[in-house]
Amino acid sequence: AQSVTQLDSQVPVFEEAPVELRCNYSSSVSVYLFWYVQYPNQGLQLLLKYLSGSTLVKGINGFEAEFNKSQTSFHLRKPSVHISDTAEYFCAVSDRGSQGNLIFGKGTKLSVKP
Amino acid sequence: NAGVTQTPKFRVLKTGQSMTLLCAQDMNHEYMYWYRQDPGMGLRLIHYSVGEGTTAKGEVPDGYNVSRLKKQNFLLGLESAAPSQTSVYFCASSSRGFGTGGSYEQYFGPGTRLTVT
């Protein structure tokens, strides 16, 4: 069965520093990959998605992610974070043969300090 | 355009009580989902629906039932609540599943925080 591993449960970082949130998935079949963000007491919002094509995907709020098929990874990056980026980030994967059901990682809490 | 709404926002139940959570979407989406979110567990799929009148089990369906009588609504029922069902419940919808030309993005509601004592 498909699984998603987010390697860090919490990532503290100072404002304007770069950040990388790591995500690995288990399946060797073709997949679709997503990053969602959840601000406190809110639902989830899509940051970016990889469906096909270029392995470097750009999303909202200056985030980007790179799909690496050989390493089954989809790490999220931002070159300079803001206080407002403090949130929980979820990586999710879906097999291309599925009906669109997402398997989520356990989440990474990003804490941006001034 | 309200997107995905959930009713109620908060609820406290006693063990054995029943309740229904309502999810409504105004985007004419075919697919709807119910998830639960527990600390350190991410989101886990309870049930989903690929269209009006259809439902299917997800990863953690036990203790829950669902109905999709109207395209815009997806109801989640707890017949006999247990403390293990204390969680935050999220509903989501998407235009279509994969391979059908859909947008693939799931739109989430604000959540329902349920406590079972």
Image (spheres, coloured by chain):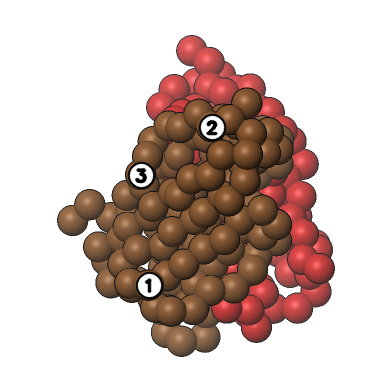
> Which residue position holds label 2?
B13
The chain letter of the red chain reads A
Badge 3 amino acid: Thr
Q: Give the spatial CA distance, label 1 vs label 2.
A: 25 Å
Sequence-earlier tag: 1 or 2: 2
Q: Residues within 10 Å of mark 2 (few under 14, many from 20)?
A: some
Return the residue nearer the eye: B24 or B99: B24
Return the residue nearer the eye: A30 or B108: B108
> Which residue position holds label 3?
B7
Q: Residue at x 77, y 59 (%)?
A: A3
Q: Give the spatial CA distance, label 3 vs label 1.
A: 17 Å
Left-right relation of B26 to B83 = left
- SS of the residue at dot 1? loop
The chain letter of the brown chain reads B
Left-right relation of A72 to B116 = right
Number of numbered tags placed on the structure image? 3
Q: Residue at x 31, y 60 (%)?
A: B25
- Circle nearer the viewer, 2 or 3: 2
- Circle nearer the viewer, 3 or 1: 1
Q: Give the spatial CA distance, label 2 vs label 3.
A: 15 Å
> Which residue position holds label 1?
B69
* Vertical arrangement, residue B73 with respect to residue A90, above or below: below
Q: Chain of mark 2?
A: B
- SS of the residue at dot 3? strand
Q: Residues within 10 Å of mark 1 (few under 14, many from 20)?
A: few
* Vertical arrangement, residue B49 with respect to residue A63, above or below: below
Sequence-earlier tag: 3 or 1: 3
Q: Chain of mark 3?
A: B
Badge 2 amino acid: Leu
